[in-house]
Image (cartoon, coloured by chain):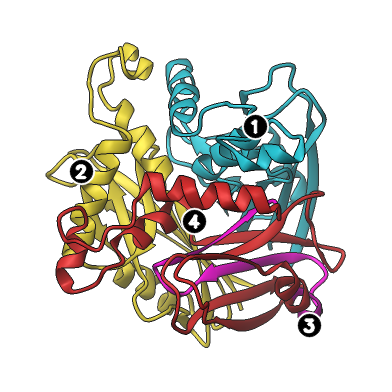
Chain colours: A cyan, B yellow, C red
Amino acid sequence: MKSHTKYLTFNTPKRRTLVRITDEAAECCRDSGIKEGMLLVSAMHITAGVFINDDEKGLLEDYARWLEKLAPSDASPDRYHHNRTGEDNGDAHHKRQIMGREVVVAITRGKLDFGPWEQIFYGEFDGRRAKRVLIKVLGD
Amino acid sequence: MKSHTKYLTFNTPKRRTLVRITDEAAECCRDSGIKEGMLLVSAMHITAGVFINDDEKGLLEDYARWLEKLAPSDASPDRYHHNRTGEDNGDAHHKRQIMGREVVVAITRGKLDFGPWEQIFYGEFDGRRAKRVLIKVLGD
Amino acid sequence: MKSHTKYLTFNTPKRRTLVRITDEAAECCRDSGIKEGMLLVSAMHITAGVFINDDEKGLLEDYARWLEKLAPSDASPDRYHHNRTGEDNGDAHHKRQIMGREVVVAITRGKLDFGPWEQIFYGEFDGRRAKRVLIKVLGD
């Protein structure tokens, strides 16, 4: 069994951004030399997520508006008790639960085994500081 | 280390359907000959998902109504900018984020290591065309 | 390839509780002797979930209130057809879909490869009876 580990660092200029990271994951898959296995991509911070969907500008706008509706930004400690700690990012912890922390992707014949439109995204919900994503490959 | 890969194809007559696929996953587990490992089941299309819950008719109706409330069907490009592309399935991309893209199931002593009520479902949110699900088994 | 399996049992006095289980997962990682691999933690019951986020009291209260808003408790069969079966836990099946059934964690150099604040939680949404969580470790 082989394994391979890589860390990506993001420091997004905007507080909330969705960043396509399929190429970084594919590169990690190639570097691993693994032909059959699984690749895990996970956010290492709890106000960010990783998900797979379409790389379409309108959809990414839709997600941003939808998440704002499901878990509105609100720095006050009334809506989010979490903000009693002095934080103002309670909403980000909720947005990430909707979009997910991690994805697991199959590797088949040395490649990410994707359908036609699958793209991996890093979902940053409280950026403007360095945050990491882990990629782990396991297989043979 | 052994691995085994299988693709299922669904072409559901209705736009939205929840289809139980536990038997297909269990068959793939048996075919792999793997005794200890993990099984990944993932939707290969971004308007469909895979999740684990109860095979109970009322609950499946509840999920359908609930998803419709959280991400209503609406072909117009006003609610979903994604529909500016000419698509009318913006809602399906959102419904799938709630239910999830994939599940990872433990294999123990050659079987899916499930609790008493766990059943795997394919969640189709924009059907009436051929779409694929991937099953990948890894282990020994 | 090595593997290791462990089952945890929870019988929470309250119907809804979020329980930190990072230490149990870390212990299972150590017991496995696996240096490079993946660890799966999954709820074996369909009215409970497993997720990773911050161990902060205010945030855990926020999640409880937020889930109640997204999927309100309601024993009647009107809101949840699932309750026509005689059950009263339709809401719990929905809450678990939001928070997730499982997490997959990378193991690197023999340890759970976590960011600074990542903690694993068992999310119980219909407790007061014995329910199990599965931990499976795979790697070398």
Closest to the camera, between mark 2 and mark 1, is 2
Residue bearing the label numbered 3 = C31
Q: In the rendered structure, the residue with mark 1 lies on which chain?
A: A
Foreground of the two, C79 or A52 = C79
Classify residue A118 as left or right of residue A19.
left
Indicate the secondary structure of the residue bearing disc 1. Answer: loop
Query: Quick check: do tags 4 and 3 share a chain?
Result: yes
Residue beneath label 2, please?
B16
Q: Spatial distance from mark 4 to mark 2, Cα to Cα?
A: 21 Å
Looking at the picture, which amino acid does disc 3 mark?
Answer: Asp
From mark 3 to mark 1, how far is it between C-alphas? 34 Å
Which quadrant of the rendered structure holds the N terminus of chain C? bottom right
Q: Quadrant of residue B98?
A: top left
Under circle 3, the secondary element is: helix
Q: Earlier in the sequence, mark 4 or mark 3?
A: 3
Start-end of magenta stretch: C29-54
Residue A10 in view here: yes
Q: Chain of mark 2?
A: B
Q: Nearer the viewer, mark 4 or mark 3?
A: 4
Q: Residue at x 73, y 43 (%)?
A: A45
Which residue occupies the extreme right position in the image? C109
Q: Which residue is mark 1?
A: A21
- Tag 4–tag 2 contact (CB < 8 Å): no
Amino acid bearing label 1:
Ile
Residue A101 in the image: state x and y as whole percent.
60, 47
Q: For the view shown, which residue lies furthest in the bottom direction?
A: B109
Q: Are marks 3 and 2 on the same chain?
A: no
* 10 Å crowding of disc 2: few (<14), some (14-19), many (20+): some
List x then y, in percent, for residue C92.
37, 62
